[in-house]
Image (cartoon, helix red, strand yellow):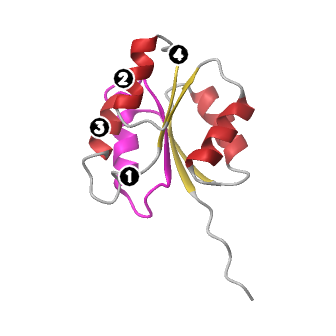
Amino acid sequence: MPEAVKKKRILIAEDDPAIGVMIAKVLSQHYDVVVVNDGKAALARARELPAPDLLLLDVMMPGLDGHGVAAAVRQLPGLKAIPIIFLTAKTGPAEVIRGIQSGARHYITKPFKIDDLVQRVKKALGA
């Protein structure tokens, strides 16, 4: 029998529980999804094994924001190349540029279309 295909793991950091649950429900159909509600928890979970294959980060979170999580992850061996997608209500051009400079592969603004999010996740994971 062939070995089961390992699902890619996505770590979602979203401080709005309703948004976190909605995203997790959709993405868990194809991925192993872990949801946390703040940046410090996201950084702690990113360091655990198995490491996530993708980080989906809200920018505005209590404690450590998405930019802080991204900066910390970029300093960790084994995680510095992990794709990051920012999901945020901050829509200004300066914010988008800051997100990309923080290491985000994609910057999705709220409100968002779930199909757009799914497509960007697939693209970031090379699927």
**What is the span of residues highlighted in magenta in the rendered image?**
37-66
Q: Which amino acid, mark 2?
A: Arg
The reply to whether residue 57 is in sight is yes
Three-letter code for the amino acid on which mark 3 is drawn: Ala
Name the residue tied to disc 1. 81
Give the residue number, with chain letter if any, for mark 2.
98
Q: Which residue is mark 3?
A: 71
Residue furthest bottom as drawn: 1
| Residue 102 picture quarter | top left
Q: Label 1 crowding class (10 Å Cα cut-off): few <14, some 14-19, many 20+?
A: some
Q: Earlier in the sequence, mark 1 or mark 3?
A: 3
Q: Nearer the viewer, mark 1 or mark 3?
A: 1
Residue at point 35% right, 30% down?
Answer: 101
Give the Cα separation between the discs numbered 4 and 1. Answer: 25 Å
Residue type at tag 4: Ala
Kindly indicate whether the residue at mark 1 contacts the one at mark 2 (C-beta within 8 angstroms).
Answer: no
Q: Which residue is mark 4?
A: 89
Drawn side of residue 70 relative to residue 21, left or right: left
- What's the amino acid at mark 1? Ala
Q: Residue at x 50, y 55 (%)?
A: 53
Image quarter for residue 77? bottom left
Q: Who comes first in sequence, dot 2 or dot 1?
A: 1
**Residue 73 picture location, percent across and down:** 32, 45
- Labels 2 and 4: the sequence-earlier one: 4
Tell me, yes or no, whether the highlighted magenta stretch contains residue 49: yes
Q: Earlier in the sequence, mark 3 or mark 4?
A: 3
Residue 93 is one of the magenta-drawn residues: no
Give above or below for 79 relative to 113. below
Specify whether 91 is left or right of 60: right
Label 2 to label 3, Cα distance in Å? 11 Å
